[in-house]
Image (cartoon, coloured by chain):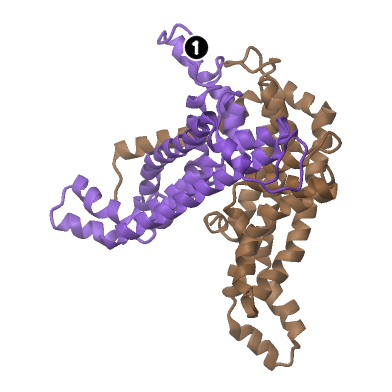
């Protein structure tokens, strides 16, 4: 990275920007925050998408095609538009607060936008179609006959799910977790807009460094940090999948 | 296998969660209030009327449209021959080329945007049509490449062989057999490329300037200010555009296949 004594870029190479970034507790806090956001959103997206994917896999309803298209089509709607929808939904005058106030459950509007909670809710919804798509492709490899065989042999529904269906759908889960984690950690639009300038993750910091404080070396260091995290996540998950496959 | 009532209710609730922001945006686009509040005090199509008269938005719409069309043309011109070369020829560096042309799908756009900014600022390409078209093509090309590669790979070789046996020259085989046979994949790929470019925000944020702004950037900047029904109306128009593209994809190659 280039040095910047007074904000002017020079052609000298230095590690000083990395030292400055890594010795700053705020930037380490941001790294932690980014990983936390990625993990939380991925876990929620997995929990919420799994029933949908399982339903679409099992159902024989004639609505199956329509429901599949409905599931995936939000992917084609711009993330700005979907984030905007959540800004209205979670705002102080939005339907969620209006309803809770109307039922007398709350005295004051709940703070669920312009903060971390709002970003987690919206990002979970935005990434659910990716997760569901990955899960569905994983289910594609599960033979329904396995479940039926377990049922014939007397396994109750819950144990059928835990011991047959879930293990067989693990490859899909691994793929979905990987995609969601990567997308959640590198998401920019939702934290920036719904965070209301109060949610700091690596992606928003890259933008801030590059476009607001015009500190390009710092932006570059933050980008490299984000890329490193993604590569580590990829490698870690790859090992995990392999060791699971051996079980 | 049969599904229970509880399961169906749970899935319905999850679908509601998934579609809620879009449905709410559609509803609020018919609010006549200056600032969105739920429920609205008065309803009407005021937001749509205001939107049509908003020159900032209409100008940005034009810019985005021109850029998206240029990106589609560039991606077809570059992607189809590249896919052809990768599928039908072997040459040194083929795998590396394939990786380079499809890798941007995995790179965070924020990192890509910063990289493009640092390069383009030296080349004086910031806030130019050329710069934006190149920037969007970097992220859009992989989609078209993948579809074209899959389509070329699935072509039955007998057809080309038969044409060649009947005296068609190699060029005729490509132009009259192979390309027409993958035109559905190219059409599907082009629609995705168009949408990716038309909706692209993050890379554009780094590459636009006061002189040249795209529609998503106008929306992005506007959304930060206040909850304006005009933005909701604009969102509905963008959703309708996406819907048209969903229908095209579903008719040509199937939506699930297209997004893989």
Chain of the residue under label 1: A
In which quarter of the view is residue B158 placed? bottom right
Of residues A239 and B13, the one drawn nearer to the viewer in this rendering:
A239
Residue depicted at x 67% and y 24%: B224
Q: Position of residue B259 (x, y in %)?
A: 56, 54
Q: Position of residue B129 (x, y in %)?
A: 84, 47
The color chain A is rendered in: purple
Of residues B141 and B190, the one drawn nearer to the viewer in this rendering:
B141
Q: Tell which residue pokes out farthest to the left in this image.
A: A154
Q: Residues within 10 Å of mark 1 (few under 14, many from 20)?
A: some
Element type where label 1 sits in the image: loop
Q: Where is residue A107 in the image (x, y as percent from the top left)?
A: 45, 6
- Total marks in image: 1
Q: From where the camera sits, is residue A240 visible?
A: yes
Residue depicted at x 61% and y 61%: B102
Query: Which residue in the structure is indicated by mark 1?
Result: A109
Q: As drawn, is A10 to the left or to the right of B83?
A: right
Q: As drawn, is B17 to the left or to the right of A5?
A: left
Residue depicted at x 71% and y 37%: B216
Of residues A187 and A162, the one drawn nearer to the viewer in this rendering:
A187
Q: As drawn, is B177 to the left or to the right of B256?
A: right
The brown one among the chains is B
Residue depicted at x 65% and y 89%: B162
Q: From where the camera sits, is residue B200 visible?
A: no
Where B49 sits versus B196, above or below? above
Q: Tell which residue pokes out farthest to the top in this image.
A: A107
Q: Where is residue A163 in the image (x, y as percent from the top left)?
A: 22, 52
């Amino acid at each position: 990275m280039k040095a910047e004594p007074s904000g002017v870029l020079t052609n000298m190479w230095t590690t000083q920007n990395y030292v400055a970034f890594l010795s700053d507790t705020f930037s380490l806090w941001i790294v932690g925050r980014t990983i936390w956001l990625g993990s939380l959103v991925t876990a929620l997206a997995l929990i919420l998408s799994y029933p949908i994917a399982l339903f679409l896999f099992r159902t024989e309803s004639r609505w199956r095609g329509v429901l599949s298209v409905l599931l995936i089509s939000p992917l084609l709607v711009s993330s700005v538009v979907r984030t905007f929808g959540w800004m209205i939904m979670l705002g102080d005058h939005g339907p969620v607060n209006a309803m809770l106030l109307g039922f007398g459950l709350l005295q004051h509007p709940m703070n669920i936008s312009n903060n971390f909670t709002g970003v987690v809710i919206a990002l979970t919804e935005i990434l659910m179609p990716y997760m569901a798509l990955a899960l569905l492709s994983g289910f594609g490899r599960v033979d329904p006959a396995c479940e039926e065989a377990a049922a014939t042999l007397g396994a109750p529904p819950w144990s059928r799910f835990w011991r047959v269906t879930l293990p067989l759908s693990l490859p899909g889960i691994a793929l979905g977790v990987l995609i969601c984690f990567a997308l959640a950690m590198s998401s920019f639009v939702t934290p920036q807009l719904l965070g209301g300038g109060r949610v700091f993750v690596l992606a928003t910091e890259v933008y801030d460094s590059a476009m607001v404080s015009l500190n390009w070396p710092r932006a570059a260091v933050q980008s490299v940090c984000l890329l490193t995290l993604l590569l580590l996540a990829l490698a870690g998950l790859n090992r995990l999948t392999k060791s699971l496959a051996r079980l | 296998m049969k599904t229970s009532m509880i399961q169906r209710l749970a899935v319905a609730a999850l679908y509601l969660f998934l579609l809620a922001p879009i449905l709410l945006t559609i509803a609020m686009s018919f609010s006549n209030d200056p600032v969105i509040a739920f429920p609205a005090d008065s309803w009407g199509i005021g937001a749509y009327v205001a939107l049509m008269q908003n020159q900032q938005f209409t100008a940005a719409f034009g810019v985005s449209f021109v850029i998206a069309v240029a990106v589609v043309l560039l991606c077809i011109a570059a992607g189809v021959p590249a896919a052809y070369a990768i599928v039908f020829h072997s040459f040194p560096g083929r795998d590396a080329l394939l990786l380079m042309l499809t890798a941007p799908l995995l790179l965070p756009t924020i990192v890509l945007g910063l990289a493009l900014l640092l390069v383009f600022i030296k080349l004086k390409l910031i806030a130019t049509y050329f710069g934006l078209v190149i920037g969007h093509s970097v992220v859009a090309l992989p989609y078209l490449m993948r579809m074209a590669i899959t389509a070329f790979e699935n072509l039955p070789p007998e057809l080309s062989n038969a044409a060649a046996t009947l005296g068609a020259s190699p060029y005729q085989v490509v132009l009259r057999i192979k390309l027409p046979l993958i035109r559905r994949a190219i059409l599907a790929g082009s629609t995705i490329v168009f949408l990716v470019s038309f909706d692209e925000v993050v890379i554009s944020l780094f590459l636009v300037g006061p002189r040249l702004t795209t529609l998503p950037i106008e929306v992005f900047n506007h959304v930060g200010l206040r909850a304006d029904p005009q933005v909701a109306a604009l969102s509905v128009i963008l959703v309708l555009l996406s819907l048209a593209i969903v229908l095209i994809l579903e008719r040509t190659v199937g939506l699930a296949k297209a997004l893989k």
